[in-house]
Amino acid sequence: MDDQVIPLDAETKAVEQPEDHREELRLWLRLLTCSTLIEGEVRRRLRERFDVTLPRFDLMAQLDKAPDGMMLSDLSKRMMVSNGNLTGLVDRLVVSGHVVRTVSPTDRRAMVISLTDEGRAEFRAMAGEHEHWIADLFGDLNAKDRTDLMRLLAKTKLSARRAIMGDDQ
Amino acid sequence: MDDQVIPLDAETKAVEQPEDHREELRLWLRLLTCSTLIEGEVRRRLRERFDVTLPRFDLMAQLDKAPDGMMLSDLSKRMMVSNGNLTGLVDRLVVSGHVVRTVSPTDRRAMVISLTDEGRAEFRAMAGEHEHWIADLFGDLNAKDRTDLMRLLAKTKLSARRAIMGDDQ
DNA sequence: GCTTATTGTTTTAAGCTTAAAATAATTGCA
DNA sequence: TGCAATTATTTTAAGCTTAAAACAATAAGC
């Protein structure tokens, strides 16, 4: 099978040679495929079943965990999207009656976004079904698979963060 | 620690009880976080380094593998995006001189999209750097990690497909 | 207090994305 | 042959997303 012998530098390490990173590339494409596949299906079901978009659902999920509401900029950090994006998203959710905007009593620049009672009730109903969809989508993974995958993704997350921010911060 | 005893049905299986799928939910959120984190960084670098968007890069990556071009609808399937989306994407890449549209000689409905020589050269340069970025982003995973993650993601992909399409097709 | 820097948000312009409807060409079949 | 169904693409309307610029209020340093 034409096994290639990789010459080693006698002193310390492998001889400099054009590195092949196709394996990492395939790993990335497979990760992206999984993510795209599942996300697409979740979007489709949210739309079909509740006539809601994934960004709206995600925003409400954050707010559901914060009984007293959240500042727009905190939402922005948590959701990893821009402030400008959230401005529009919140606009639409205010119109549909799911959330309300309040000026922060302690900082007149800041907006506090909160779920309305109707918004919270509607979100809880959606979240219940959503959890079952996810369980189904990952249904063929056994307990060990899930544990291993969690661990490897945690490691991937740290690796990516290191590459993005540098080792120091 | 208040260990909860789960009563078993004497006959066949565990007593019906509200199932908890929080673990799968956490798994999904972690997968999504990894994907979002890496994708965002790749977008940022493509923009900063080559002033190109990820969708354009992805489209050119598909075309680079097809020396004789590809039909728009095949591109659509491969890239998992809508036809309408591709129409606009191709428009912009035609304007920038990276790709050309040709009417298929065998089917007058179909458009064949191909890279121009300049488009191909530019893509190859970008792809070279891109591969290094990915290698860096996944850099803290060792060989076994990568193998295991590949396998688990393959299983996840099949599981999701099964949940989306049903076991039969 | 005054000034500068920072922080929080919105606006703008451009591009990405989709579903649904509209067009156009081909295929299948009676 | 002719017509119905299918396939390939584009158009449209709406929403998502971002970076950059603009604006407003607070915090920090002098």
Image (tube, coloured by chain):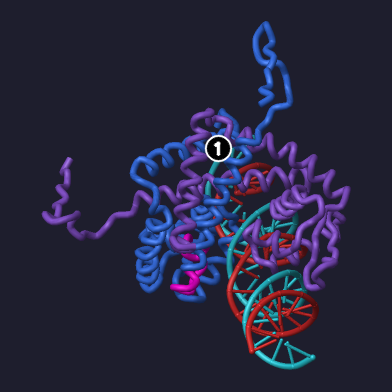
Chain colours: A purple, B blue, C cyan, D red
User: What residue is shown at x 68% (from left), y 18% (from top)?
Assistant: B6
Q: Is residue A117 above or below residue B22?
A: below
**Horizontal placement of A134 versus A17: left or right?**
right
* Chain letter of disc 1 in the image: B
Residue occupying the point 61% across, 41% down: B26
Q: How many marks?
A: 1
Magenta stretch: helix, strand or loop mostly: helix
- Give the vertical position of A38 relative to D18 (above or below): above
Quadrant (top left/top right/bottom left/bottom right) for the N terminus of chain A: top left
The answer to which quarter of the image holds residue B60 is bottom left
Q: Which residues are magenta?
A: B46-59
- Residue type, label 1: Arg
Residue position for label 1: B161
**Residue A137 picture location, percent across and down:** 60, 36
Residue A40 position in % (x across, y down):
62, 48
* Quadrant of the rendered image containing residue B65: bottom left
Q: Residue at x 37, y 65 (%)?
A: B129
